[in-house]
Image (cartoon, rainbow, N blue to C red):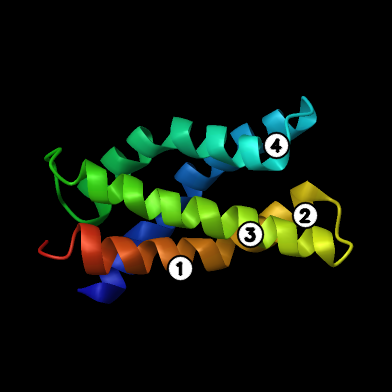
Amino acid sequence: MVNESLYKFILVGFLNTLVGFSLYALFIFFGIPYPVAVLLSTVLGVLFNYKTIGKIVFTYQGGSRLLPFILVYIIVYCLNVYGLWQFESLGLDNKYIAGAILLFPLALISFYLNKSWVFKND
């Protein structure tokens, strides 16, 4: 059921987002450029997210869908960096706020891609 899986995705997403955004903020704090900060926080969170999203949200326990899952994260990464660049070009230089604004739309895109492509048979 889409509503139940979306509900679970949102709950699991809070934990995953907390981890990912905390890493992103930490990297920004240490002066790492935002494209690299997004990349590092994404890479470090992918395996954890794969297990939590796959098992809890879509009841999948295998490892064969890791590559499509990673591809979803590559798409989300590109959208994230593009969004941050757009905010910067509009004069919003605060990367913490810009990153926080992007969390919800990127989460919806991630859910849709995972549901319709990565875990579509579950």
Q: Earlier in the sequence, mark 4 or mark 2?
A: 4
Q: Residues within 10 Å of mark 3 (few under 14, many from 20)?
A: few
Q: Residue at the location (30% across, 42% down)?
A: 50
Q: Which mark, residue 25?
A: 4
Q: Position of residue 21 (x, y in %)?
A: 60, 42
Among the two numbered marks 2 and 1 on one chain, the one whose residue lies closer to the N terminus: 2
Q: Position of residue 80 (x, y in %)?
A: 59, 56
Asked if disc 4 and disc 2 are in contact, CB closer than 8 Å, the reply is: no
User: Which mark, by number, is residue 108?
Assistant: 1
Q: Is residue 19 visible?
A: no
Disc 1 versus disc 3: distance between alpha carbons? 16 Å
Give residue 122's position: percent from left, percent from top: 11, 61
Name the residue at 85% across, 67% down: 90
Q: Secondary structure at mark 4?
A: helix
Q: Which label's residue is closer to the chain start, 3 or 4?
A: 4
Residue drawn at point x = 36 percent, y = 54 percent: 72
Badge 2 crowding class, 10 Å Cα cut-off, few under 14, some 14 to 19, many 20 or more, is few
Q: Are marks 2 and 1 in contact (CB under 8 Å)?
A: no
Q: Amino acid at mark 2?
A: Ile
Q: Identity of the amino acid at label 1?
A: Leu
